[in-house]
């Protein structure tokens, strides 16, 4: 069964969306405006949005500015940012272990409370967790927990990772676990810059064998429709 992403033309390209229960490794250049994809993914169903780089109120303002997201009441923010950066203590060491333990406990509570309900999980960014001073086993354990939860609920999970930032070995391990690999970057042609994405892996389906251009407009992601998506 395919689950819509919340972006109509992306779903048309994928013939309906991504397979239910997919873990999506969403890797992007930091200047590509890729976070707008994440904002629109929240429109497809109830979403638990784990924020590690900004306060939820700022994210809420950004998501609200995109007219296609109608019901922010179905977006539940999990504020890792404030818990880690604004409590007055420095990072590293035991604090890094504690934030991993806290997010695992939070995810387990969501698992228990939602039970059979379908929902999304977005981690913005998973780069935060990859840079913690913890054993790589803890990171893979966290990925596996998210994987199991999204498989059980039948929604979609997105791990947003900044490109060319992290140790390649652990990235390869996570990409091997992931059901979908979604890449966003910027192509520079002369004096022009084109935002584009590719979907190089979709477990159980054929991936997209080409780059697809997009732009960010007033209503969010606008995918280049010059290609055949019928």
Image (spheres, rainbow, N blue to C red):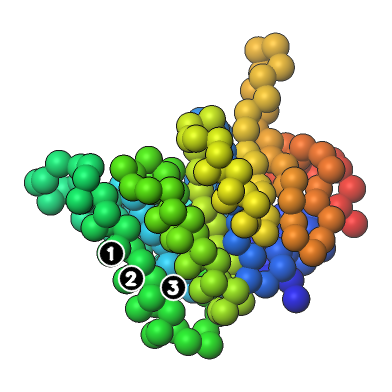
Please say if 128 is above or below 147: above
Label 1: few (<14), some or many (≥20) within 10 Å? few
On the image, numbered disc 2 is attached to which residue? 106
User: Which residue is disc 3 drawn over?
Assistant: 74
Vertical placement of 179 versus 130: above or below?
A: below
Q: Position of residue 163 (x, y in %)?
A: 54, 34
Q: Secondary structure at mark 3?
A: helix
- Residue 128 is situated, as x and y percent measured from the top left of the image, at 38, 45
Residue ID at (78%, 58%)? 14
Residue 62 makes an appearance in the image? no
As displayed, is residue 168 above or below residue 175? above
Mark 1 — residue? 102
Relative image position of residue 187 (x, y in whole percent): 68, 25
Residue under the point 48% across and 87% down:
115
Q: Is residue 110 left or right of residue 150?
A: left
Question: Of tags 3 and 2, which is closer to the observer?
Answer: 2
Give the crowd class for mark 2: few <14, some 14-19, many >=20 residues within 10 Å: few
């Amino acid at each position: 069964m395919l689950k819509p992403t919340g972006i109509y033309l992306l779903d048309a390209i994928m013939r309906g969306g991504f397979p239910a229960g997919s873990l999506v490794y969403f890797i992007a250049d930091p200047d590509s405006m890729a976070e707008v994809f994440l904002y629109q993914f929240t429109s497809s169903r109830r979403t638990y949005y784990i924020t590690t780089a900004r306060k939820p109120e700022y994210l809420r303002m950004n998501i609200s500015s995109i007219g296609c997201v109608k019901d922010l009441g179905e977006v539940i923010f999990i504020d890792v940012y404030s818990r880690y950066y604004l409590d007055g203590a420095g990072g590293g060491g035991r604090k890094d272990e504690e934030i991993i333990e806290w997010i695992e406990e939070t995810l387990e509570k969501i698992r228990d409370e939602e039970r059979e309900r379908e929902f999304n999980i977005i981690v913005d960014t998973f780069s935060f967790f990859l840079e913690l001073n913890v054993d790589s086993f803890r990171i893979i354990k966290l990925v596996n927990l998210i994987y199991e939860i999204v498989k059980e609920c039948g929604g979609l999970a997105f791990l947003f990772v900044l490109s060319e930032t992290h140790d390649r070995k652990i990235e390869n391990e996570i990409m091997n676990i992931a059901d979908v690999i979604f890449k966003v970057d910027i192509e520079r042609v002369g004096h022009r810059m084109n935002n584009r994405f590719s979907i190089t892996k979709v477990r159980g389906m054929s991936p997209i064998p080409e780059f697809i251009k997009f732009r960010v407009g007033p209503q969010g992601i606008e995918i280049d429709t010059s290609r055949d998506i019928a």
